Amino acid sequence: MLDLGRLRALHAVAVHGSVAAAASALGYTPSAVSQQITKLERETRTTLLERRGRGVALTDEARHLAATAQELLAIVERAETVLEERKGKPSGRLTIAAFASAARGLLPGVLAELERAHPGLDARLSEVDPHLSVDLVARGLTDVAVAHDWDIAPLPAPEGVDQAVIGDDLCDLLVPEGHRLAGRRAVRREELPGERWICQPPGTVCHDWLVRTLRATGHQPDLVHQAEENHTQVALVAAGLGIAMMPRLGRGALPPGVVAVALDPMPRRRLYALWRTGAARRPAITTTVTTLQERFRAHCATGSEHPREQAL
């Protein structure tokens, strides 16, 4: 009989494209995933992975087996959902994927609350790009995803995936102290030509939003520095090297030398929780989604993400 854990490892490699990426998603080491697949090859007496340059590729037999594994994992999930639903309380393992600033600014409180209120629930977090996490939910590799979108790039809604709005995350313009805009209560986008911008790399939603929004006002933004981490962008602003547009969630307190100014109209990104339709009745998921919504509302109400404005 084929081992479900080994099939899960093969399915993860098929989805993520490499042993290392599959290991990261499953919370294992690459060597552990390789060992699982080696054992599966012995069980099936079939070659499942072939060397391709520095990486590996699935054989035709492996792709067929990975598709079967996905069907089996879906059956197991339905069975686990029924059992948990009958118990009437969250239990078992729950994997959560969240983008970086949500993982930093929202999930610690959510996970602590779930652990305190539901000791039978084993919730585990992975930091994942929002558009990748949606696919992980659809393929059955993650139970819940916390993702976001902007008006220019609506979140994809794959078949078989449900979603609920967590809330709207507001964004501010960050400028160095002494900047011409630092004393303003609000700034319109048409007032920003000629500024030097610090932003995320091309291909990210935040980068694309910034470029499209500023182009719509009739000018091409001068993108002088690119950094994935928000803290790096803030440090560059503090050094007087440019300005940045940044969401509030997970940003933390601004350091000396950086001032937040409101944009008019104020940009916002919408946060979502996503899960597979077949697991929608699972108490662990319904409780987690409710906790995400409640913690986000409380987080916004405390004012902890409000901009530090320069006194006028």
Image (cartoon, rainbow, N blue to C red):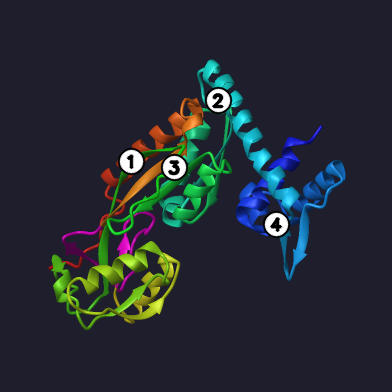
User: Relative to 135, is 106 on the left or the right?
Assistant: left
Which structural element holds mark 4? helix
Alpha carbon distance from label 3 to label 1: 18 Å
Q: Earlier in the sequence, mark 3 or mark 1?
A: 3
Alpha carbon distance from label 1 to label 4: 33 Å
Which structural element holds mark 2? helix
Viewer-proximal residue, 253 or 104? Answer: 104
Identify the mark at residue 109; answer none if there is no mark: 3
Q: Which residue is mark 4?
A: 19
- Give x and y (percent) for residue 275: 47, 38
Q: Is residue 9 above or below residue 278?
A: below
Quarter of the image for the C terminus: give it. Answer: bottom left
Type of amino acid under label 3: Gly
Image point (14%, 68%), residue name: 188
Alpha carbon distance from label 1 to label 2: 23 Å
Q: Which residue is mark 1?
A: 165
Which structural element holds mark 3? helix
Which mark is nearer the camera, 1 or 4?
Answer: 4
Chain part drawn in magenta: 244-267
Residues marked 1 and 4 touching at CB (< 8 Å): no
Identify the mark at residue 81; answer none if there is no mark: 2
Residues marked 3 and 1 touching at CB (< 8 Å): no
Alpha carbon distance from label 3 to label 2: 25 Å
Q: Earlier in the sequence, mark 3 or mark 4?
A: 4
Which mark is nearer the camera, 3 or 1?
Answer: 1
Type of amino acid under label 4: Val
Residue 7 falls within the magenta-colored stretch = no
Type of amino acid under label 2: Thr
Image mark count: 4
